[in-house]
Amino acid sequence: MKQFQVELGNQSYPVLIGSGVLTRAGRILHSLGFRTAPVVVSNRRVLRLHGSSLLRSLENAFGPVMILRAGDGERFKQHSTLIRLYRDLIRGRADRRSWIIAFGGGVIGDLAGFAAATYMRGIPYVGVPTTLLAQVDSSVGGKVGVNLAEGKNLIGAFHQPRAVLSDTGALGTLPPRELASGLFEVVKCGAIRSEELFRYLERNVADLRQCLSPVVSHIIFEAMRVKAAVVAEDEREGRERMVLNFGHTLGHALEAASAYRRFNHGEAVAWGMIAAAELSNSLGMLEARDAARIAALVHRIERLPALRGISAARIWANLRRDKKFDSGSIRMVLLSRLGQAEIVENLDPRYVRRFISEFLGTHQQVLCSEV
Amino acid sequence: MKQFQVELGNQSYPVLIGSGVLTRAGRILHSLGFRTAPVVVSNRRVLRLHGSSLLRSLENAFGPVMILRAGDGERFKQHSTLIRLYRDLIRGRADRRSWIIAFGGGVIGDLAGFAAATYMRGIPYVGVPTTLLAQVDSSVGGKVGVNLAEGKNLIGAFHQPRAVLSDTGALGTLPPRELASGLFEVVKCGAIRSEELFRYLERNVADLRQCLSPVVSHIIFEAMRVKAAVVAEDEREGRERMVLNFGHTLGHALEAASAYRRFNHGEAVAWGMIAAAELSNSLGMLEARDAARIAALVHRIERLPALRGISAARIWANLRRDKKFDSGSIRMVLLSRLGQAEIVENLDPRYVRRFISEFLGTHQQVLCSEV
């Protein structure tokens, strides 16, 4: 089992990663000072696949555990689910000394974390992420929240977990596209901060696709380390933390331009990273072969859904709604080399727009896979 | 104009109190570093009575201001209002650099403050309380939130304002019972921490009922000082902060026992303080004449709605739902002298229950006023 500490002053917390963490969760959490039984927030699928080992361990350590089920999927990450959670907490007599375990993927983490942030003005929570994406991404950083019809993550808070327990054993049941989604997040961490991690991914991509535990543990650890380091420098949404958005500006626009149907979030970000790397190269910041390495690694991880039929105009329209588009000029995270991200201000919108058209033109022809 | 600083490390903020603060709000907030136009959250009544002076001042300093109206009254302090506020913020293109002014009484402060705490994971807000209760109480402390059908303030956050501007001129339009409600909160501050403030109230009760500005400014300043000192010692809901609940345990039970109809919150707390003082005396902690001074001051401020018809059994049933009732024994804030509160643990429930019956018996006969 690997462990490190996210350093946030008096809000610091440990992250534990390894195979079999679920079966030891009760003892681990007891040793971290918890004494009463937690409220476990999860969904039916996660409970069916991995519930018994976690729950048995928790019950051994703390006695009977209250379990609250939320729906499975992004569309449940909204106020009606949240209010049902609040009501269930009240009915279950949860009070200020209660604590929550968010047991599932990113949606459960965001929902349960936000419920914890706001129930009785805030109670503690522990993250037990069961997807690779949640293990490398949303479980570190303290961002919690829900969507509104108008957009994702518009409502939320910063609420740091007391601990994060990531069992790599839980990843074996992930659908391949979800696994890939998490791997793209790791690629991002390598690209922006750690060429070493990037090279490790290149060398071990075959084992990663098969989810071999020691290899996966290593990359989760390294990706979390990258993320924790960035977050520790900048807990709130300041400038430094922006580098974590590498690939996301174009990725979000691509998701929206395809009505959130063709790509999952990771796949859209993967295309966004390929595009951002090529843009970095076209601006003379990044060498062509480094941009090519990003595209090659992404495509070895998964054959991405094609860009065919996506119009540059629609991507552009969605980009312009993005918060990074400050009154005319564009701010983006680009690369100066593998392992080194730069926040570039004042990009010329006309240049970026032309680049998007050209990028779509090239990649729609060369890399089209069947959807 | 009086001013002091609520000391909370890097979350410290100034409180300004005086007549005419509204007309100077724009300049004051500009001098505190705000540069863009705020979003003002208020209600129709407050805007009609006091809106023009605040808005003119803000527009002079920052240009056109977005105004969002919430319903007037506790029943609007709930998620449906909150979600409408979120939507209006989005429609008005509020982003992470936007800030909110909560302009109104406690309901507006709690709602707008919680919207600020959670919109895009938190944006700044400034309190401009227009009721005495909000000026002395809810505007200091950073407690924000909404109700659920199951109970008040169950959902919320700690989100400190960037500043609080209290215009005593706004209090002239308050209904007498609302003014009294605020004065009871000041009585509480005197009772728990400042005999000097308590004595000042005794000497000036006639002027206070007429809302004479210098007298009111003085007591707001002193009450805020008491509260700020307690909050500064203990920002989150720890032990120290509990002394601010003096009168509230019995007050809440009384409100609930009368179905929230007969007493407003301040009046229920006023009865709660009288009862807590008598209980302190019956336990040998507080001298009888000090308990009598509390009752006398309260009754000079307002002829409280009578206790007639309220059953001890119902108060007791509601008390037992209170969080301070830990597995059998009772924790309450009592007085050891005027100006000195004590948190008393392990009160014998049978003793407290008998006391409540006796208290109701005495006060139902002696002090019944017409409702």
Image: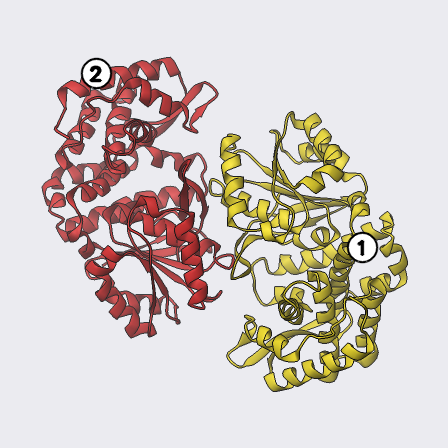
Chain colours: A yellow, B red
**Gap in angstroms between the C-alphas marked 2 and 1:** 72 Å
Labels 2 & 1 near each other (Cβ < 8 A): no
For image coordinates 20% across by 49% down, the residue present is B218
For image coordinates 55% across by 53% down, the residue present is A146
Whether residue A69 is situated above or below residue B100 in the rendered picture: above
Query: In this rendering, does residue A322 appear at all?
Result: yes
How far from the left and from the top, in percent, is residue A70? 60, 42
How far from the left and from the top, in percent, is residue A23? 76, 34
Disc 1 designates what residue? A176
Mark 1: which amino acid? Pro
Disc 2 designates what residue? B361
Q: How crowded is mark 1: few (under 14 residues within 10 Å), some or many (20 or more)?
A: some
Q: Look at the image and tell me in which quarter the C terminus of chain A lies.
A: bottom right
For image coordinates 22% across by 59% down, the residue present is B1
Mark 2: which amino acid? Gly
How far from the left and from the top, in percent, is residue A310? 68, 74
How far from the left and from the top, in percent, is residue B311? 27, 19
Chain of the residue under the numbered disc 1 shown in the image: A
